[in-house]
Amino acid sequence: MGLFIDFYDIMFGIEDAVDNFFDSLSEGVNVLLCDPEIDGKKAGYERASKEYEKVYKELKQEHKEIMEQIKNLRNTYDFKSNMLIDRLAHLEERRDDLKKKVQCKEEQVSKKYNLNSRLKIIHCSQSFDFSNFLQNSV
């Protein structure tokens, strides 16, 4: 039985020794084939990529928020501009109606007082010289 235990120890001891030999051999090959500068750069790149990933996510979120603000502002400005365009259209309609009313009134007054050629409507933006008007009308 002692012989069997010795044989067992020798067989499995050799197996462990062979495993250890191949492990150390593969480590030795890795050391010979690997460049520590490349491994250092690789580790640095991986660390930097993790840091940049955080920054990228923050920038992406900020971009999303800014685009949402721009969209909201654009919608607000679109609404305001449409409202102002509608108001302008309404004011232009009122202006045209008032022009028509003034023309109708001008025609009525011209016919009533027989002033067809001399009656002129003076706009608020124009200056008017009454002395000239009176001299031309006499």
Image (cartoon, rainbow, N blue to C red):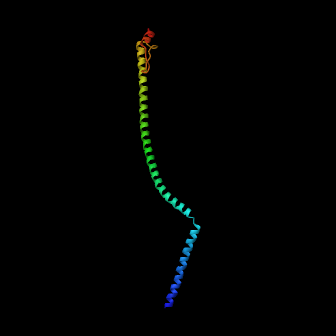
Which residue corresponds to the image point at 43% horizontal and 45% vertical from the top-left? Answer: 69
Q: Position of residue 99 (x, y in %)?
A: 43, 23
**Residue 98: quarter of image:** top left
- Residue sitting farthest toward the top: 138
Q: Residue 60 in the image: x percent, y percent?
A: 46, 51
Residue 13, percent from left and from top: 52, 82
The quadrant in which residue 71 appears is top left
Number of labels in the image equals 0
Residue extending farthest right:
33
Name the residue at 53% across, 84% down: 11
Residue at point 57% right, 71% down?
Answer: 28
In the rendered image of this protein, does residue 84 appear above or below residue 56?
A: above
Picture coordinates of residue 20, whole percent (x, y): 53, 77
Q: Is residue 27 left or right of residue 63?
A: right
- Where the C terminus falls, by quadrant? top left
Q: Is residue 28 left or right of residue 51?
A: right
| Up/down of 26 relative to 103, above or below | below
Residue drawn at the location 55% of the way across and 64% of the way down: 36
In the rendered image, the vertical position of residue 3 relative to residue 131, given as above or below: below
Say which of 99 and 13 sits in front.
13
| Residue sitting nearer the eye, 83 or 117 | 83
Q: Residue furthest bottom?
A: 1
Q: Nearer the viewer, residue 34 or 100?
A: 34
